[in-house]
Image (cartoon, helix red, strand yellow):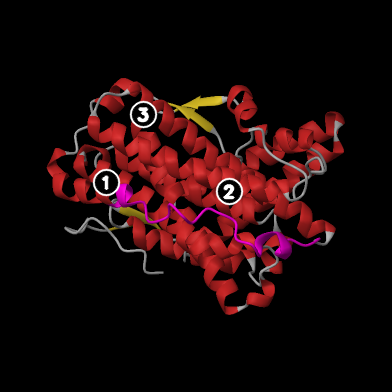
C-alpha cells in the first residue's frame, strides 16, 4: 500500500477522502449551459427506452443490508484491513463525486432529457455512496459526505471531457465489480466481507450509466471524430493507467480475493475495451508487451514517489520530483503507442453479459 497515514480515525478517513493526487477520485464542475444545449433527438427511441429502464428502477430494493450482513463482518489482518478501508473510502469518494456532479447538472439545466437522466443518476450514485459508507461504520468510521462536498477541491471539465471520463469510469467500474463478483462466486471461501455479495446487481447500475453517456456521444458524433479522437485516447489511457497504478498499491486486497493485480487488471481492460467499441473509434492495445512494460514503469514511478514522500526533507522532495518526471515520460510514451481502430456499430447499446 502507498505510504499514507494509517486509517484509524474519522479524521484519517476524511483526510484520505480529500487527498488530491493523480490517482485519487476528483470532484468536477462543467459548462452547464452547454449541457443544457445537448440534443439526443436523433436517438429518440433508444433514449426513451433507456429512461424507461431507469424509471423501472430494478435495483430499488437492492441497497439494503440483509440480516446476515453484520454477522459476516469480521476482523481482518492489519494489512488487508488498511487496504480494504482505503478501497471503501476511494469508492465512496468516487460514487459521491458522481452524485454531486449529476445533481448540479440536474439543478442547472432545463433540457428535459438531460434533467431526467441526471435525476436518475443522482439517485443511483447516492445509494451507492451511502451503502458503502454503512460498511465503513461497521469499523466505527465514516465519510462525512456533506463536509467532503464543502471541502473537496473541484476540477473544471468541459462537457466532452465529462462524457469521455465518466463513460469510461462507469464501464470500467462495471468490469471491476463483475470480475470480482465472478471470482468470489467461484470461491466463496475468499469472500472476506459481505459487501461483495451485492456487486452483481450493483454493477448493472454502473453499466447502464455508461450506456447513457454512450447514447449522448453517439447522438453528437462530432465528439467522436477529428481532434477529439486524441482526447479519447488520452482518457482511455488515463483511466486505465490510474486503475493499474492504484490496484498495485493494494496487493494484499487483491490476493485476499485470489486475484493477482496484473491478471485482474488486464481482464478488466479486456472487458472495458470490448464494451467501449460501441462508442469509441479507437482502443488501446493492452496486450502489447511494450504497453504492459509502460504500465509497470508507471507503478515503479509511483512507488518511488511514495518513498520520497515517506523520506521527507529535501532529498525526499527531489526523489518525488524525479519520480514524477519519470511517470510523465512513461505516460507520454504510452500515449504515443499505436492504437487499434475500428468502425462504430449500428447497434449502439450493449448487454452486460460478462
Residue 2 in the figure: left or right of residue 208: right
Q: Which residues are magenta?
A: 53-75
- Horizontal and vertical percent for residue 334? 49, 50
Left or right for 139, reference 108: right
Query: Residue farthest to the bottom?
Result: 186
Give the image location of residue 64, x and y in percent: 55, 54
Packing grade of label 3 (10 A; few <14, some 14-19, many >=20) is many
Give the mark nearer the N terminus: 3 vs 2. 3
In the picture of the structure, the residue carrying the numbered disc 2 is 131
Name the spot of residue 105 as percent of width and height, x first: 37, 28
Q: In the rendered image, is residue 9 in sight?
A: yes
Q: Mark 1 or 3 closer to N-term?
A: 1
Please state if 60 lies on the left or on the right of 264 as rendered: left
Q: Are marks 1 and 2 in contact (CB under 8 Å)?
A: no
Q: Label 2 crowding class (10 Å Cα cut-off): few <14, some 14-19, many 20+?
A: some
Q: What is the quadrant of residue 44 in the picture?
A: top left
Q: Quadrant of residue 260?
A: bottom right
Residue on which the image places disc 1: 51
Of helix, strand and loop, which one carries label 2? helix
Measured in 3D between alpha carbons, the distance from the residue under mark 1 to the one under mark 2, in whole angstroms, is 24 Å
Task: Please report the residue visible at 66 percent of the width from the left and 61 percent of the height from the top.
Answer: 69
Q: Secondary structure at mark 1?
A: helix
Q: Dominant secondary structure of the magenta stretch? A: loop
In the image, 56: left or right of 326?
left
Q: Which mark is residue 106?
A: 3
Gap in angstroms between the C-alphas marked 1 and 3 = 15 Å
Q: CA distance from mark 3 to mark 2?
A: 22 Å
Asked if residue 234 shows in the view, the reply is: no
The magenta stretch spans residue 11: no
Amino acid at each position: 500500500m502507498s505510504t499514507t497515514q494509517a486509517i484509524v480515525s474519522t479524521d484519517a478517513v476524511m483526510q484520505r477522502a480529500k487527498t488530491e493526487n493523480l490517482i485519487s477520485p476528483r470532484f468536477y464542475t462543467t459548462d452547464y449551459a452547454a449541457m443544457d444545449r445537448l440534443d439526443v433527438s436523433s436517438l429518440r427511441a433508444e433514449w426513451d427506452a433507456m429512461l424507461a429502464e431507469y424509471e423501472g428502477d430494478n435495483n430499488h430494493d437492492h441497497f439494503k443490508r440483509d440480516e446476515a450482513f453484520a454477522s459476516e463482518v469480521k476482523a481482518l489482518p492489519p494489512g488487508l484491513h488498511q487496504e480494504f478501508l482505503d478501497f471503501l473510502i476511494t469508492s465512496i469518494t468516487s460514487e459521491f463525486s458522481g452524485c454531486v456532479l449529476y445533481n448540479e447538472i440536474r439543478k442547472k439545466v432545463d433540457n428535459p432529457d438531460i434533467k431526467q437522466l441526471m435525476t436518475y443518476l443522482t439517485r443511483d450514485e447516492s445509494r451507492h455512496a451511502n451503502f458503502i459508507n454503512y460498511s465503513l461504520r461497521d469499523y466505527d468510521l465514516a465519510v462525512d459526505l456533506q463536509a467532503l462536498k464543502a471541502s473537496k477541491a473541484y476540477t473544471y471539465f468541459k462537457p466532452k471531457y465529462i462524457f469521455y471520463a465518466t463513460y469510461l469510469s462507469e464501464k470500467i467500474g462495471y468490469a471491476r465489480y463483475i470480475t470480482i463478483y465472478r471470482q468470489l462466486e467461484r470461491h466463496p471461501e475468499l469472500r472476506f466481507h459481505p459487501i461483495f455479495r451485492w456487486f452483481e446487481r450493483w454493477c448493472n447500475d454502473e453499466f447502464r450509466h455508461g450506456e447513457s453517456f454512450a447514447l449522448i456521444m453517439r447522438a453528437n458524433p462530432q465528439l467522436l471524430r477529428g481532434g477529439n479522437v486524441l482526447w479519447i485516447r488520452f482518457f482511455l489511457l488515463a483511466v486505465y493507467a490510474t486503475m493499474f497504478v492504484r490496484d498495485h498499491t493494494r496487493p494484499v486486497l487483491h490476493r485476499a480475493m485470489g486475484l493477482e493485480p496484473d491478471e485482474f487488471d488486464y481482464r478488466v481492460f479486456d472487458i472495458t475495451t470490448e464494451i467501449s467499441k460501441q462508442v469509441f473509434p479507437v482502443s488501446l492495445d493492452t496486450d502489447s508487451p511494450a504497453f504492459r512494460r509502460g504500465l509497470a514503469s508507471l507503478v515503479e514511478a509511483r512507488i518511488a514517489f511514495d518513498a520520497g514522500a515517506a523520506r521527507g526533507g529535501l532529498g525526499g522532495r527531489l526523489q518525488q520530483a524525479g519520480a514524477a518526471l519519470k511517470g510523465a515520460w512513461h505516460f507520454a510514451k504510452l500515449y504515443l503507442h499505436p492504437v487499434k481502430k475500428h468502425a462504430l456499430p449500428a447497434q449502439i447499446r450493449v448487454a452486460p453479459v460478462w
